[in-house]
Every structure is written in C-alpha cells, then in structure tokens.
Image (spheres, rainbow, N blue to C red):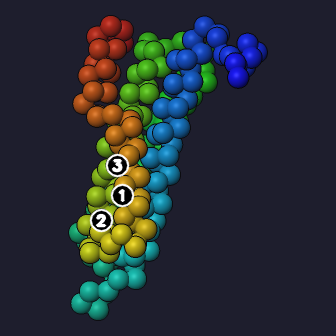
Amino acid sequence: MPIARVDVIDAEGAWEWLRDLLTAGTCALSLGLGTAVLRMTGEYTSRREQFGFPVATFQAVAVQAADRYIDLRAMEATLWQAVWRIASDAPSALPTAADLAVAKIWAAEGVRRVVQTAQHLHGGFGADTDYPLHRYHAWAKHLELSLGPAAAHEEALGDLLAAHPLG
C-alpha cells in the first residue's frame, strides 16, 4: 500500500531535526539506564556486609560511586543543553551538532563507566545472567555502540570548533 503524500515529512531540515531528536533520546536512555544502575548499586552495597560493615561505608566504594554520580550529572547537563539547542532558534557560535557531540561523548562513555563500576561493586552477582544488572550491562553496551565512539565525536567537535571560531 503506498504512503499517502500527507504522511510524508518533506520539510527542509526535517531529516536532520528527526536525527537530532533520536540522538537526544538515545542519550536520555543512557542517562536513565545509568541512574537505575547506580541506584541498584547503592542499594546492593548498602545491604552487602564485609568485615561486619556495609561495603558502601568503605572509602574505595564511596569514591567509585561518587565518580559515577558525577558522570550522571555531566550526562544530564550535556543532554539538556543539546535538547535546548534542538528546540531553540537562539543564535550560537557553534551549530547544534556541537552540543549533540558533547552529549554523545558523555552518554556513551558515562553509561559504560557506570555499568562497569556497578559490575565491579556487585562482584560475581554482576555477571549472573539471572540478576538484572546483566541485562542493564547488555543494554548499556547497545546504547554505547548506537551512539558511536567518543573519539569520533571528539573529532567532529574539533572540526566544528575549527570551522566556527569562538573568538
């Protein structure tokens, strides 16, 4: 059955706008997944005891959790900046692609670090296929691969900075 002409989006820039929204949505999924994984890890490390104390009270565990929390806040800030740029017509020295590149860098790298730390802090449970963290890890890997390598986004950002001096 042919598609009705009214159902075809053919406005100038529609494809780019939709691609940007998809990218922002993928970054948002990474943030949500990372947030759920860090919450799960906090609950687990608060219950799990070693030497008579919850492992969450150990400095090494607390520092790792804090680092991952910082990753999540950076993912959130860069995501909202990119979404604002997609929705805004405000002039800027750099195109929207620059803010999306930064959001993709943080989302891909951040979700990987959050899940890897969670795997580490959960010990053997993190690798158990019956434990939810295993599925989160697989989903995070899929999102990271969907967003592409951070090095490619850093290179694209560098190209944008070279083409659009901020001075």
Q: Quickly name the residue at label 1.
A: 137
The quadrant of the rendering that contains the C terminus is top left
Nearer-N-terminus badge (1/2): 2
SS class, disc 1: helix
1 and 3 marks in contact (CB < 8 Å): yes
- Label total for image: 3
Which residue is the extreme one toward the bottom? 52
Q: Which mark is residue 119?
A: 2
Q: Quickly name the residue at label 3.
A: 141
> Crowding at label 1, few (<14), some or many (≥20) Cα neighbours within 10 Å?
many
1 and 2 marks in contact (CB < 8 Å): yes
Q: Residue 53, how many percent across, how many down? A: 31, 87
Camera-near label (2 vs 3) is: 3
Residue 130 in the image: above or below residue 108? below
Residue for point 28% across, 34% down: 149
Q: Is residue 124 visible?
A: yes
